[in-house]
Amino acid sequence: MSERIDVSIEHRHAPPEDGRRHPNTCPKCGSHYRDDELAEHLNVCPHCGHHFPLHARERIQQLVDADSFVEEAAELRSDDPLAFFDLRPYTERLAEAELSTGLGEAMVIGRAAIEDQPCQLAVMEFGFMGGSMGRVVGEKFTRACEGAAERGVPLVSVTTTGGARMQEGILSLMQLPKTVCAVEDLRDAGGTLISVMAHPTTAGVLASFASLGDVLVAEPGALLSFTGPRVVQQTTREKLPDDFGRAESNFRYGHIDAIVPRRELRPMLGGLLRLFANGR
Amino acid sequence: MAGEAEQLRLRSQLSRLRGLPLLRGAKLSAELERLQKQLDRVVSEPSDEEIWRSVELARNPDRPYTLDYVERLLDDWFELHGDQHHGDDAALVAGIGRFRGRTVVLVGNQKGRDVKERTRRNFGMAYPEGYGKAMRAMELADRHGFPLLSLIDIPGAYPGVSAEQHGQGGAIARSQALLARLRVPIVACVIGEGGSGGAIATALADRVLMQENSIYTVISPEGCAAILWRDAGEARKAAAAFKPDAAHCLELGVIDAIVPEPENGAHTDADHAAQLLGDALAESLELLESQSGEELRRQRRVRFRTIGQIPATR
């Protein structure tokens, strides 16, 4: 628990009028933190347990043994196969995403060790165009599977994504079967996929590799739904359950193996990696 | 201009086929003719208006649906019902039948004709139960060595509360994973709307075809417009931007061939449309039937591994 006096009650029901809030203000309880306070708590609200989003680099740093991560395929960049233009050109959105995240795409892959167990990592970045999966994300995930198979180590994927990247049209839909085939090849090679789903893991990624882990775990409160609550509400006009699509609901319905708070994620992965290595 | 690479690819395919010893005689010349037609088609890229016309034709309520083709193409049809866990999803049909001399398993999305049937079939939008039924049928095909035909015509997997509770995302993922494992020939054809994840769930095939006036999309034009233009009314612009028509899908290497339709669309002459579809499916099966199960599976995965290669990895 934080040593600070909690003043969250005073503004709990009064979020800023325009709906925007400071990224360090907890959307659930309204508590506010300095950067170093949040970092110390792995970006989890010490007051109410809300899991703040994590950038891919922060996630990797939290999970792996110090200095063990070696990035791969960092040079891959998307081009613009359809010359897609909505309100702005796709190429402009890509350039902007790269500038704001410092990443070449919405997924970072590489080799690493967790509690001395070697593994392959594929970690998504929601800040890069909503963590959407286009051809480069599909390619990077496929290479992560191939790397895991070649080295005979498990693959750990951490997803946070809105789904397929519309700007790549039908080619982005093709990343679903592509990543599914990559997982099947990994399985045939005797490999392991551990899928960690962070908020949100929806649509095309949930409907492909993220659901195909040997083990499926999620962070508390993560939205894991094929269709998001807003669209379901609009289409069906059904009253949605309070925890619609959330990790807790998915756990109750038997779609995931565990809900793991961020603090416990690294030791849990270490344990699983030891199990799948089977004493090696 | 249509992709020069695609034109080149078709041209080289044409010349390679012309050079082959005529093992299958007439069948091979049909393939030549089809490639020539495709070449003619990609040379003239469809305009935005033509793209929207495809969207409208793909959704035409008089367009033949899966069971219309089953009736015209399969003998001794026996329909399978239920996923053997929860229920029977009428939005996705599956069954066994005889197709031009061989037993096949067929799965397909099914819309309804009148209000009552449309409701019963949930406008063709499958629940996870539908994919469960499809997976049963796929396993049956694999056990018995029957080729699998898959007809795609789905606006999208159903976006509802119970669909989510029953695991829509996981069902779509596992259906694809099963297709990636099958050791029998798989031919898929989009016969109307190839809507996103709901479509790809049953479209991970060795050969993927599209009828001339069908569409294949990552999201509906309306959905895309609502998100990117913040106005669902801009669906035409969205469709023009993401190019869901058959000619573009062929150019992008997403499909292997375009199945011609009667001149004014499949809805004007279901018998003729079925004849043309049957010819294309038979031709595709013949191309695959000489390959071993292992080879089919390997090639299928390579097919999806290499679709839409990014420049750096070419």
Image (cartoon, rainbow, N blue to C red):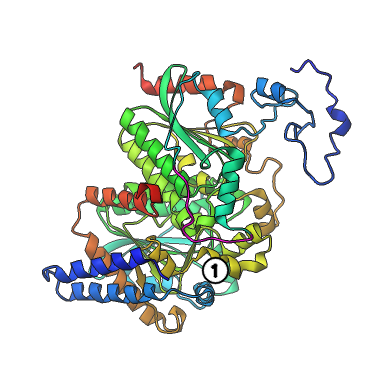
Q: Does the magenta stretch include residue B25?
A: no
* Quadrant in the picture for residue B239: bottom right
Q: Element type at marker 1?
A: helix
Give the residues in magenta: A76-87
The answer, for residue A194, to whether it is visible in the render is no
Report the quarter where the C terminus of chain A lies: top left
Report the quarter where the N terminus of chain A lies: top right
The answer, for residue A51, to whether it is visible in the render is yes
- The x, y position of residue B46, in whole percent, is 46, 74
Q: What number of labels is visible?
A: 1
Q: Does the magenta stretch include residue A82?
A: yes
- The x, y position of residue B7, in whole percent, is 33, 68
Residue receiving disc 1? B240
Residue under the image location 30 percent in, 34 percent down = A189
Residue B205 in the image: above or below residue B313: below
- Classify residue A74 as left or right of residue B282: right
- Would you call the spot at circle 1 few (<14 residues within 10 Å), some (14-19), or many (20 or more)? many
Residue A181 in the image: above or below residue B276: above
Q: Which of B308/B260 is in front?
A: B308
- The x, y position of residue B137, in whole percent, is 37, 54
Residue B86 in the image: above or below residue B25: above
- Classify residue A111 as left or right of residue A33: left
- Classify residue A48 as left or right of residue B169: right
Q: Is the magenta stretch mostly helix, strand or loop?
A: loop
Residue under the image location 56 percent in, 55 percent down = A90
Q: Mark 1 lies on which chain?
A: B
* Quadrant in the picture for residue A220: top right
- The x, y position of residue A159, in whole percent, is 53, 38
Disc 1 residue type (three-letter): Ala
Q: Which of B263/B227 is in front?
A: B227
Q: Which of A162/B49 is in front?
A: B49
